[in-house]
Amino acid sequence: MILDRHQLGSNDARLYTVKSGARSLVHAIYIVNTTSSRRTVRIHHCRDGESSGTANALLYDVAIAPNGTLIESTRFVMEEGEQIRGKADASGVSVTIYGTDQ
């Protein structure tokens, strides 16, 4: 099931937040570079109220090849209010987060 999908911008932004009273199991994060130029991305798993930083980075300055796809197929549980956040060095990068709400 798709939990959420977004186009990454150059500023850190919320990609997914666990709903009130819920938890989510993330199965995979697909990151697709739809341009003919290399892109660099950052993806973070933040606790409620936490900012993106090196301590909560899932991917940090990872290069995505032109017209390439990176699949981060890790499983982790997210609690109420936790977020996945991200950004890219330029436009043309889409992110899809797959998982289940519990």
Image (cartoon, grey):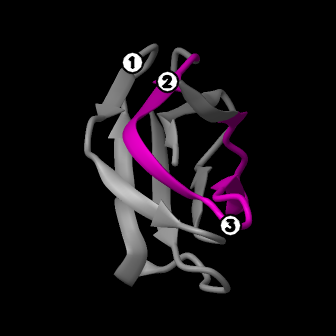
Left or right: 96 with respect to 56? right
- Above or below, 36 against 9 in this view is above
Q: Residues within 10 Å of mark 2 (few under 14, many from 20)?
A: many
Q: Nearer the viewer, mark 3 or mark 2?
A: 3
Q: Say which mark, if any, is on residue 68.
A: 1
Q: What separation in Å lies between label 3 and label 1 (alpha carbons)? A: 36 Å
Q: Say which mark, if any, is on residue 21.
A: 3
Q: Secondary structure at mark 2?
A: strand
Segment tinted magenta in the rendering? 6-34
Name the quadrant containing residue 17. bottom right
Q: What separation in Å lies between label 3 and label 2 (alpha carbons)? A: 31 Å
At 32% from the left and 55% from the top, the residue drawn is: 76
Task: Report the front residue among 17 and 58.
Answer: 17
Q: Say whether residue 37 is magenta.
A: no
Task: Report the front residue among 94 and 28.
Answer: 28
Q: Residues within 10 Å of mark 1 (few under 14, many from 20)?
A: some
- Would residue 13 be visible to someone looking at this image? yes
- CB-based contact (under 8 Å), mark 2 and mark 1: yes
Q: What separation in Å lies between label 2 and label 1 (alpha carbons)? A: 6 Å
At 65% from the left and 42% from the top, the residue drawn is: 90
Q: Say which mark, if any, is on residue 32.
A: 2
Q: What amino acid is labelled 2 in the image? A: Val
Q: What amino acid is labelled 1 in the image? A: Gly
- CB-based contact (under 8 Å), mark 3 and mark 1: no
